[in-house]
Amino acid sequence: MSASTDPTHLSATVLATLLAAREISSEELTRAHLARIDALEPRLRAFTQVLRDEALAAARGLDEERRRGDIRGPLHGLPITVKESLDMAGMASTLGVASRKGHRAASDATVTALLRRAGAVILGRTNVSQLLLYNEARNPLFGQTANPWSLDHSPGGSSGGEAAAIAAGMSPLGIGTDIGGSIRVPAHCCGIVGLKPTLDRWTNKGSNTALLGQEAIRAQIGPMARSARDIALVMSELDPASMAELDVRVPPLPLVEPASVEVARLRVGFYCDDGLVPPSTAVARAVAKAASALRARGATVVPFTPPGIPDAVYAYFAALSADGGTTALSLLDAGEDGSEGTDIDVSLRSLRTMASLPPFARRAAARIAGLAGERRLQRLLEVTGPKSVSEFWRTTHALREARAAIASAMRAEALDLLLCPPYATPALPHAASRDFVLAGSAAMLWNLTQFPAGVVPVTRVRPEEARRERRRDRLEKRAAEVDAKSVGLPVGVQVVGFPFTEHLVMAAMIAIEDELAGETDRPVTPVSPPSLAG
């Protein structure tokens, strides 16, 4: 079967059109994707569960509905996948820890239920980082997911299994969650598209977290796909206004269609370096290339760096660590029967070490880091750790002030959108996320501000870009190691808007995608792992 006739190589939008025209059945489409899963999953390990029988039964039922003329909408019969952390009735959302294996969801997450109602066929559930707390997709229960572009690299995380499945053509469309780049970083690493909507733009009911009750920085459910139009399709079908009837946190505001946006009237700011981890050369080039693409579409594009990014990002870490790590560690310290500890992934071992440090030891470690020239590590050690209620309130206030300052600065420049990196480097080699959390600052900023942000693929790393001149400390040395192994990997750009302007974000993503279509170095998916190519 050639790429032109293989349905697993087509976008969700095209597949929806073929289904509507009855040129392909849902059962045929589902079987094609299951066959690709059979071929590629042994090498990629993107799935925690493949729901073969359930998917085929659902597809046959939806085909029968179509024959009767009962059409649910554009997603009718379309295969999709969902992240393991989202509830599915009767199944466990383990987050990669043994203590949650006995958990059984009473019902589907609301987004999952709405997808089923819209006629989507759920192929399976996809792998995550343990506790959803680092930018890889590996845990002791389900193993390590590989990046389809390079089996030696991670697909990112925590929605990395979802990104790998979509990039490899095992799924045309998926649902992830994002608390610090967990949709956008995997999209960047795998050469696909992802959108983190405004906080509570989509309902988050039934989305599990390792930090239950932590409300200063909350995760947001969002879509992932191979094209920006596919993202617009599912955002339109799962309209936030209808979700408001099911979840009081969702504002009853209808989604504006991105097709109504005149890109030529947009004013867009861009920046490459947020003052934390300098971006890889290829990452900076991707931002510049996306800026040029929007200029070519008539938009006004100007340099602009949001104020106070480092302070805001350190406040992000201060908030997430305010309990001293006890909530997350309680899940790691309990086994399947609640009595024995679970295996801990290498990327979380530093969390346990830091959490166990008494205050005087943490202060001493911070001073030592500062004397050694590790200023960023010093600051990280200073801000993380347990906090009193008053300290936590001050941290929360700092986060809200950062949000207001960035919004005011953008409005002062009459900006509609921003372009920036999704991550400091291309995809990481496996296990390289340990002690490299600040590399995700470009994505984390838009979680703490609660702005919508999407990622669209732009280019691939060139041989001459696989090096880094400046190596001042351990962060930049790690970044240099990552860059050295990055030739050929995909690179995306992040598009950010004001709250509730997903239509502008998606319109810009579509414009970038269209302008760069056909460029020789633009990442094209689906891609097969190198050893299975052809």
Image (cartoon, rainbow, N blue to C red):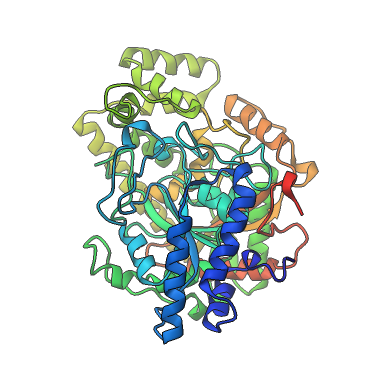
**Residue at image x 49%, y 42%?**
441
The residue at 58%/31% (across/down) is 432
Q: Nearer the viewer, residue 215 or 147?
A: 147
Residue 473, compared with residue 531, is above or below; it is above
Q: How many marks?
A: 0
- Where residue 350 sits: x, y (%)? 45, 23
521 sits to left or right of 109: right
Residue closer to the observer: 12 or 250: 12
Rendered-image quadrant of the C terminus: bottom right
Residue 336's place in the image compared with 222, above or below, is above
| The N terminus: image quadrant | bottom right
Question: Which image quarter: residue 344?
Answer: top left
The residue shown at (51%, 51%) is 162
Q: Position of residue 19 (x, y in %)?
A: 54, 78
Tell me residue 36's x, y (percent).
Answer: 62, 56
Q: As drawn, which residue projects farthest toward the bottom?
A: 69
Q: Is residue 409 visible?
A: yes
In the visual, does 14 lie left or right of 70?
right
Q: Nearer the viewer, residue 302 or 421?
A: 421
- Residue 412 in sight: no
Is residue 255 or residue 291 the one in the foreground?
255
Residue 17: x %, y % from top left = 56, 79
Q: Is residue 404 above or below residue 10?
A: above
Residue drawn 38% across the image and 47% down it: 85
